[in-house]
Image: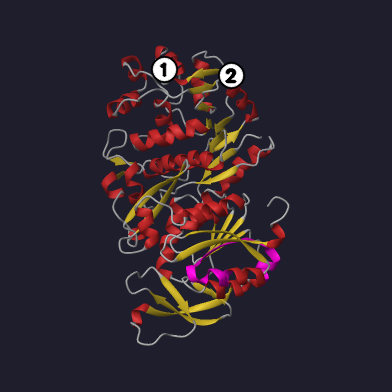
Amino acid sequence: MALPVFVINRRIDRDRLERFTDSASHFGIVPERIDALDAHNPDFPFALHADLIEDHFWGAPEAKPGAIGCFLSHRRAWQRVLDAGYDCALICEDDAEILRDPTSLKDVLSTVPNLDLLFANGRLASWASAASAPPFAPIQDVLRKVSDLGGPAMLSLKSAPGGDCYLITRSGAQNLLTRTSDQKITCGVDWAMVWNGVDRVDEALTSAFPELKILNDHGDVPSPMNILVAAEPVADQVKGPSVLQHAISHPIPDLLKRDSRLTHAEAVSSIYLGETILNFASRSGPDPVMEAHRAGQIWDEPGLTALLRRFPEGGTFVDIGAHSGNHSVVMARLGAAARVLAIEPNEEILRLLKLNMEINGVADRLDMPPEAVALGSVSTSGWLIRNRRRSSETMVRREAPEAQDPDKVVPVKMQRGDEILAGERVDAIKIDTSGSEVDVIKGLRDTLAREQPQVLLDHAENAHHRIERLATEIGYTLLETLPSGRKKRLSSLLIPVARTGGGQ
């Protein structure tokens, strides 16, 4: 398998992405873009990451937003290694330029089977060269030799190691995610990686690298990770002025204050699904999906597991009744969906859906109709009825119910799914529309016949036989029926009859 190459890039930095992609293309590399967190955006929700941010940064009560955003973006890249099931990957920042074919770095894995991380950037390569280190040397050996020679300044070397290019293994990604979660963000991500590869910080090291003293004062590294430095760099940073104002710092308590983006979210839960960490913002109040998240559980995990087994990497997932994004996030992260089309009629809950896709690093895969819409068997106008006790739960009806609280009943546009999905590739559809699932399917007949996607359908227990009959009518079969998260509800996986043969 070719070496996966990631490039960490903010969406606004298109010129950087083009430059990096061009340098990579000379070696036949098509990099995968990691959507970087833009912490320089005034609306960046630092409060969502408060559990990872310490009350000091380099020992001071202020921090540079960009440095924190960079750290969080690298964590996003490490998690992607785990999500994709890669044995290793090359991670680069978008201001790097590929100098030589990085494939040869994989050869180190055969000689160093317990490798966690291999720095392959120009800055650390210059440190290794100044220290006359072997082609692949332990980071702690390089630091000690540079220290013996008087430190980076004495050798006219860059004072920071840089995190612009490094090979990371699966074990290294898991180690760094776990360690940096415990250690919290207290410094630049490059020094955090270096520090975790040092067995002992003594006076000689701290005199040459005062950063290590600040880190060591914060806490001890439990045991060094196996981190090497390549004496010949694979990539180097491109020189030139930065569009970012790196010198700007803010008091950390100010960064962590709640902002306008969080007025509709009251908590963030981190949930492990296998080796993958998923984050879900929620608010208080009775809501079964958000209650599951706050309890550390994924909503409808049995149904999602069944869906994931058959979902093609890079496919398109359609989430009908997307709510706050439970299924959308899982299919983008674990299913590696290249595109998620989320359809949700409740405008109030759409803000949480967008936020959850963003904090999980998959906002760039989210697509939505231009306005809140409900799907049905015909295109018409209808009414969105909010649950009296759970306002985030809704149902849609064509006729306005009588004697209802006006605040609980609002007009909504209804549309046939075939109109929205005309000409679209569709690999899987989830439908959870609180009772109107059959009407939704009737409005999807053309799409189902054309694309033959698998369908995960939430429905009432007493509608089971009706669902079976409907499946037969549209050329589908009911493959699995699983328990739903709600009482008297089931989750059924339907697949086209044409796909039931040939080992499907």
Q: Distance between the residues labelled 1 and 2?
A: 34 Å
Query: What residue is shown at x 52% (from left), y 54% (from top)?
Result: 304
Left or right of 121? Residue 37 is left
Amino acid under disc 2: Thr
Image location of residue 346, percent across then percent down: 43, 71
Q: What's drawn in magenta, residue-wise?
A: 446-467
Compared to residue 195, the image places residue 440 above or below, namely below
Image location of residue 227, percent across then percent down: 48, 24
Left or right of 402? Residue 419 is right
Nearer to the camera, 213 or 466: 466
Image location of residue 28, percent across then percent down: 69, 37
Q: In which quarter of the image is residue 214?
A: top left
Compared to residue 377, the image places residue 361 above or below, namely above
- Graded by Cα atoms within 10 Å as few (under 14), some (14 to 19) or many (20 or more), the crowding at tag 2 reads few
Asked whether the viewer can see residue 281, the reply is: yes
Amino acid under disc 1: Met
Determine if the magenta segment contains residue 459: yes
Query: What residue is shown at x 26% (from left), y 39% (from top)?
Result: 61
Query: What residue is shown at x 47% (from left), y 77% (from top)?
Result: 396
Looking at this rendering, what residue extends furthest in the bottom direction? 402
**Residue 154 image label:** 1
Residue assigned mark 2: 111
Secondary element under disc 1, as helix, strand or loop, is: loop
Determine if the magenta segment contains residue 419: no
Q: Which of marks 1 and 2 is in front?
A: 2
Q: In which quarter of the image is residue 225?
A: top left
